[in-house]
Image (tube, rainbow, N blue to C red):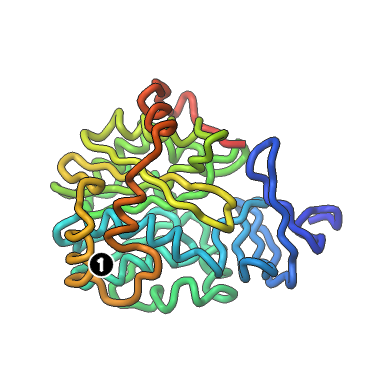
Amino acid sequence: MSDTSPIRQSWFHDGLSSDLGVVHRIEEFLYTGRSAYQGIEVIRTRSFGVCLVLDGKIQSSEADEFIYHEALVQPAMIAHPEPRTVLIAGGGEGATLREVLKHRSVDKATMVDLDEQVVSVCRKYMPSFSAGAFDDPRTELIVGDFRKFAEESPRTFDVIIIDLPDPLEVGPAQLLYTREFYTAVKNRLAPGGIMTVQSESSRWYDLQAFVAIVNTIGDVFTRTAPYQVHIPSFSSLWGFTSASETLAAGVLSREEVDARIERRVKGLLRSYDGQTHTGMFALPKHIRTAVEACDTVITDASPLSVY
């Protein structure tokens, strides 16, 4: 990596769009390298602590990763009546796995990640993110192509959590946001199962990817429920989508969510509870209007690229 790269300066520039970015003061470079698939950096920033950066984009930060990972995992886990088998796509930091394993009902959590180096780097330099989840006897870690796994495995799962990188034009994830991909994922769900997908930014000026993902998932599943939370280290609202043939995560009441957390979750939830759940699914009118107006379906022949 050249000395002129933004990651090599005392300030790191994180591009939010082609017209907007945020700069972070760097205190320390903990790791810089490149796998067969992507650039990997771990930096310590003044404002957000230790951050994972892939291909120049912040993926998660020590200060607020709990907001992102609880929002990604907990609504689907709580919506399912008794999740015993869970499949995770990506999630190299191990924080998605950590959140899944907080549920007493889980017998096995299978995590499939393409990039073994990301997992190794995160375990070494960011151990608080996984908090021992990789060593839990319920964990099964598979290094491999998640799409291939979804298309070829005969196994089914109660809950599937998709925590994949942004579909960059030059990145490996473009074909992991298409109708064909979500169809393969649907086939891995057990009867009564539910899936959740990180669905890109829901910023008011940058909704195209979010609404296209929501619409594409809705082309495959009977029930879809988009939602959002604010992620401070992303300087953005961030979108997610839950999908199922039978379950509707967004309709659970505040009281029911809190009761299920009390019965089923072991360990602290710092962000997610019944009140948070209700707010996450209460999308403002301009986003609901954009979702309803979208007719884009992402396909293998016409994949999504956010940059």
Image location of residue 245, percent across then percent down? 18, 39
Q: Quadrant of residue 67?
A: bottom left
270 or 13, which lies in front?
A: 270
Camera sees residue 107: no
Q: Residue at x 35, y 62 (%)?
A: 272
Amino acid type for the residue under numbered disc 1: Lys
How many marks can you see?
Answer: 1
Q: As drawn, is 6 to the left or to the right of 57?
A: right
Q: Is residue 298 left or right of residue 42?
A: left
Residue lying at 49% horizontally and 30% vertically, measured from the top left: 303
Tell whether 258 sits left or right of 284.
left
Q: Which residue is mark 1?
A: 108
From this view, report whether residue 144 is shown above or below residue 21: below
Residue 269 in the image: state x and y as whole percent: 35, 70
Residue 27: tell me if it is visible.
yes
Q: Residue at x 69, y 62 (%)?
A: 33
Residue 98 horizontal/vertical position (percent) = 38, 70
Disc 1 residue crowd, few under 14, some 14–19, many 20+, Cα 10 Å: some
At x 37%, y 37%, the residue is 181
Seen as rendered, the residue at the extreme right is 3
Q: Nearer the viewer, residue 125 or 11?
A: 11
